[in-house]
Amino acid sequence: MEELMYYVWQQKMFHSISTLDNTEIEIINPGVRNIDAGPDFFNAKVRFNDTIWAGNVEMHVRSSDWFRHRHNEDNAYESVILHVVLQADTEIRLHDGETIKTVVMKIPPEVLEKFKNLTSSFINNFSAINCKNDLGRVPSIILHDWQTALAIQRMLNKVNRVRDIIENKQKSWPEAFYVLLCRALGTSINSDCCERVARSLPYAFLQKHANNIRQVEALLLGQANLIDNIETSNEYNFLRTKFGLSPVCNCAWKFSKIRPIASPKFRLQALASIINHHPNLLSDVIACSDIKAIRKIFFVPNVLGISTVNSIIINAVIPTIMAYGQWQQDEALCNKSIGMLEELPAESNRYMDHWIACGIPLKNALDSQAMLHLYKEYCEPHRCMRCRIGCWLLKHNHR
């Protein structure tokens, strides 16, 4: 509910706003929304009678939430000039004993009803897109701009993940790419287990034996506890002793509801084949001039088809190239990564099925990545007041 209050306050959409002591009030400037710790709005400007106050604003559903959130113990809230609430159930004083001006905000009933419809978790059992029947009213420019912003958000999240891995891997870009690649090969079902295997087995060890695919397979399958024959087991035991390795324990591989070709064993064997042909994998990928050349590196007949390779490019190749381009301050490399998203076809999965059913066109992977981010980060958790579509629908509810 506070998310709704923030938006109504910013847009001055409230039906009325009044102080408890009937002081005349005018909201000159609602201030700047603060998404970090501290008061909800900075640098607001409010007129009480003939006096203009400037400072910070805090919002709660009830006045008593001030104490429930322990703001009375935090000096950051001593600068609050106005407490905006829906229900005034107690008086709030600062440490010096001064009473904070409290105002009661009344939200228009139609706005409140629309908000409840947007954020309800009970409207549709099959999709979290509660606004799907209203999407046709949203101007195309709003949708297009929001899609672009969402795609960038998702890519930056992935870039930050690359940076986190880089820090943990002593700034080794080949190691970081190898970890991301393993995770992408596991898909959503076995991604965590595949990443654990990669983190337990340095890429440098695989490079040392890259010319012997049997040894690379033994290392990967042995660390994953997926060896099923004596010959590979003997090979792994020798290499395990050589490098001082310990296989990954308690890795709950999932085999049900996936095609045999997508099993972890086949995926790790495919990775062994890729490393066998491209021991300097990241360098070879960066050197590729187009998507076709990158696909050729990761295509493994009868195991990794085009759709899987496209997924690898989206989830491992592009984020790594973008992060590396930023690190090198190479604008051309960053633009290349975005260009690849626009070249790749839109993904096909249950999330995209929901958007297609809503009439949202998905031209390429940039669009599908944007809408995947929208669904997971805004629709499912019902963060409609942080979504440009939800805000537009709320603001134009009366039209």
Image (cartoon, helix red, strand yellow):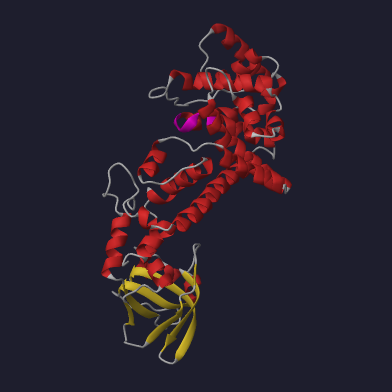
Q: In the figure, is residue 317 to the left or right of 261?
A: right
Most common SS among magenta residues? helix
Q: In the figure, is residue 103 to the left or right of 318?
A: left
Instruction: Classify 120 as above or below 193.
Output: below
Residue 373 in view of the camera: yes
Q: Residue drawn at (32%, 56%), measured in percent from left and top?
A: 118
Q: List the single residue furthest toward the bottom.
A: 50
Give how far across and how far down residue 394 sits, in percent: 35, 63
Q: How many numbered discs, if any?
A: 0
The front one of 156 and 310 is: 310
Q: In the figure, is residue 113 to the left or right of 352?
A: left
The verdict on residue 392 being magenta is no
| Residue range corresponding to the magenta coloring | 184-189
Give how far across and how far down residue 373 sits, in percent: 47, 46
Q: Residue drawn at (62%, 11%), measured in percent from left and top?
A: 235
Residue 194 in view of the camera: no
The front one of 363 and 373 is: 363
Give how far across and how far down residue 138 sits, in percent: 40, 57
Image quadrant occupied by the N terminus: bottom left
Image quadrant occupied by the C terminus: bottom left
The verdict on residue 188 being magenta is yes
Give how far across and how far down residue 227 sits, in percent: 53, 14
Q: List the single residue furthest toward the top.
A: 230
Instruction: Classify 274 as above or below 195.
Output: above
- Please tell me in which quadrant of the rendered image residue 62 appears: bottom left
- Please tell me in which quadrant of the rendered image residue 114 appears: bottom left
Q: Residue drawn at (42%, 22%), measured in percent from left and top?
A: 255
Instruction: Classify 135 as above or below 267.
Output: below
Q: Residue drawn at (63%, 42%), measured in percent from left and top?
A: 337
The front one of 68 and 399 is: 399
